[in-house]
Image (spheres, helix red, strand yellow):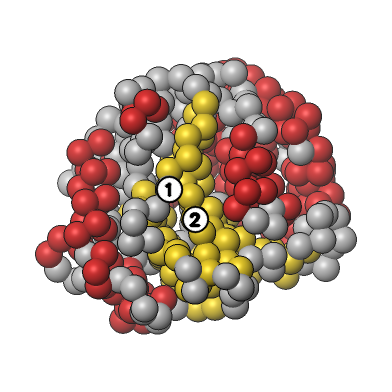
Amino acid sequence: MKLLLHASTATNAADGGRELGAEFAPQFRESVRLYLEHFGELGIPAETVRTIAERSHASLTAWAPGLAAETEAIAASTGIELWQLASVGARTEILGIAPARGAECSTAVLTGDDTAPETMQTWDWHEFLVPEGLMRAYVSDAGLNVKLFTEFGTAAKIGVNDAGVGLHFNILSHVSDSDAGGVPVHAVARRVLDEARSLDDAIRIAQSAAVSASTVLTVFESTAAGSRAASLELSPAGMAIVHPAADGWLFHTNHFLDPQLAEGDTMPDSAESLQRYDHLDGVRATLAGLTSVQRAAAACGTEGGGAVICIRPDDSLPRLDQWQTLLTISVDVPGFGLDYFAGDPAEAAVEGMSRL
């Protein structure tokens, strides 16, 4: 995956959409083409894709009209049909009706009194779906400076704002996921980054979204008194809040940690997700007090158990079972920055990480 950078001069989301569309029209068109093809590979009928995309965009319009206007501006400036672009924005909602498959992401966050957040995440996905990703810097409609990573067509994944709030993003799967076309979970992440000035704000924003697909947002804040974090497990059945352990560490992979929601977990390979979670738990003593590159190296060495975090494709498997760690990223909340590398933590430890 190649990462492209964009620093916006727009003063609102709609203008930002027009700006993005003008600069990255080929990338948005390619993202739409790849996802529509992927939905077909998964056996999701085109009319179902369109229905969920249109329902999700309507939900977005009611819940966050500025973000809906951004999507509409990108579509208008690129010549993409609105429902097609909205299908990428609602890709998790559409994928939520297909059987869940394989690996995804691993997140580690440390918070506590008199300390700033220390974070690390790997983003695992199909490389053939994301030849290029987007690193954005802009001013939100609420007046916050924001930096984030996302795919072309989705509102947000991982990021930070200058009010001292950051977040990581992991997909989940639940029996309550449906084709209802709720608020896109990527838009929930985006609205947290755009508006939240505290962890409490983030919780309020997330609780206000009626979603039709499951995801966890691990949100953290940095203040003069220290830092706090919580994993907000979203599902159509409700939202649960998971707090850090006594030592301040909060880990999340791709299974529900809340006991009640876990009863409806439908991730098919929960054992693999548990293995990644257990690996992070097992190396927790080695992760604190490190630079972003050092933390990535500690989480995923070049051999041994760290291989469960550094996911590399297996050419012997079918294309739809090909997974790869496409991004390693850490959020520096006090420094309002993202340290990132387009690859896995072992590679990042060798080649170093870039800074937005």
Q: Position of residue 299 (x, y in %)?
A: 28, 67
Quick one: label 1, few (<14), some, or many (20+) residues within 10 Å? some
Please name the amino acid that badge 1 sits on.
Answer: His
Q: Is residue 5 left or right of residue 37?
A: right
**Picture quarter with the C terminus:** bottom right
Q: Residue at horizontal 47%, vertical 34%? A: 240
Q: Secondary structure at mark 2?
A: strand
Q: Position of residue 238 (x, y in %)?
A: 52, 26
Please name the amino acid that badge 2 sits on.
Answer: Ala
Residue 88 in view, yes or no: no
Q: Position of residue 46 (x, y in %)?
A: 56, 22
Please tell me in which quadrant of the rendered image residue 306 appears.
bottom left
Please tell me in which quadrant of the rendered image residue 300 appears.
bottom left
Asked if disc 1 and disc 2 are in contact, CB closer than 8 Å, the reply is yes
Q: Is residue 316 left or right of residue 187?
A: left
Relative height, residue 89 to residue 349 (above, below): above
- Work out whether residue 222 or residue 190 is closer to the camera in this orientation and state it: 222
Tag of residue 229: 2
Relative height, residue 45 to residue 254 (above, below): above
First of labels 1, 2 by sequence position = 2
Tag of residue 243: 1
Q: Is residue 231 left or right of residue 335?
A: left
Q: Residue at horizontal 61%, vertical 61%? A: 165
